[in-house]
Image: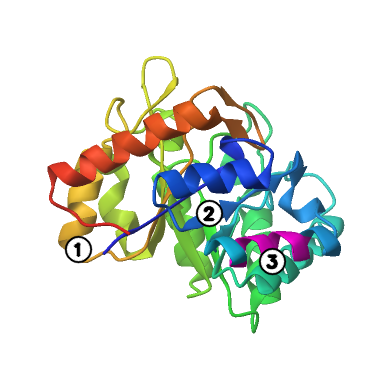
Amino acid sequence: MWTLTGFADEIAPELDVQLDTLADESIRYLELRGVWNKNVLDLTASEIATVKSTLSQRGVGVSSIGSPIGKIPIGDDFAPHLDRFRRALQVARALEAPYIRIFSFFIPAGADPAHYRDEVLDRMSRLVRAAEGADVTLLHENEKEIYGDTPARCLDILTQINSPLLRAAWDPANFVQCGVRPHTEGYDSLRPFIAYVHIKDALLASGQVVPAGQGDGEVRETIAALRASGFDGFFSLEPHLAAAGTFSGFSGPELFRVAVKALKDLLREQDIEWS
């Protein structure tokens, strides 16, 4: 049984609207990236308490904290960012989230990523050490313009850190936007590390984000392979159908429903049950 979740801030800033739309689609989890036009890590203790209470009342769990950790230039001072990561750990604990999404730092445009490898690995190692004992797993999301943008560099991070506290969040659209055919070029090597899946698709020719199964992200093939491998985890809708930015995206309620239908159609094609 696979579990659907999603970046509910793509629906609307207001928590009630987010939850109403998820309820309409029988989705019982959300990936918390933002609410009330605030990033999850900028919410006050009082706001976190309100989120926790509201989610409890509505019967919705938090699948992951969709944090922006690691989305800074590799040359920026890391100490304040490490403090911000500790805030992410606090939020995950408060909301009983089993995962925190992270990234592997922006590399200067045109630079050789290999030049920054040691610094990236050092920072990723420090994040993992900071998470020890927190009862949470970190999910590295492949993202364009960071060190871990291609399957090879994602694999480099995961194998070099070599910790059960660091797994992969598979994002097919982000791979496509780096010129990669995800399943063909990356799935086999990364499958041992895939613990979480982001559902969005994109076109190789333009990078435009499209509903799952309508682009070059090989979502259909990946779903089949995950099923064959016995995958049992979260599929998180991150549609980006109206807007896509560095730190967030937006779809609105109607386009979010379009994205949900596209995923459910793919699952029905293969007789896969979800909850």
Residue at which label 3 appears? 53
In the rendered image, residue 268, in percent from the top left (x then y), is placed at: 17, 45
Task: Specify whether residue 210 is in view.
Answer: yes
Residues in magenta, as a range: 48-56
Relative to 107, is 21 on the left or the right? left
Residue at which label 1 appears? 229
In the rendered image, residue 55, in percent from the top left (x then y), is placed at: 61, 61
Q: Amino acid at mark 2?
A: Leu
Residue depth check, mark 2 versus mark 3: number of the one nearer the observer: 3
Q: Quadrant of residue 71?
A: top right
- Helix, strand or loop: magenta stretch: helix
Q: Residues within 10 Å of mark 2 (few under 14, many from 20)?
A: many
What residue sits 26% from the left and 64% below the top?
A: 1
What residue sits 28% from the left and 57% below the top?
A: 274
Q: Amino acid at mark 1?
A: Ser
First of labels 1, 2 by sequence position: 2
Judge by depth and name the residue closer to the eye, 78 or 199.
199
Kindly state the secondary structure of the residue where label 1 is placed: helix
- Rendered-image quadrant of the C terminus: bottom left
Cα distance, mark 1 to mark 2?
25 Å
Q: Quadrant of residue 159?
A: bottom left
Cβ–Cβ below 8 Å for labels 1 and 2?
no
Residue at which label 2 appears? 30
Cα distance, mark 2 to mark 3?
14 Å
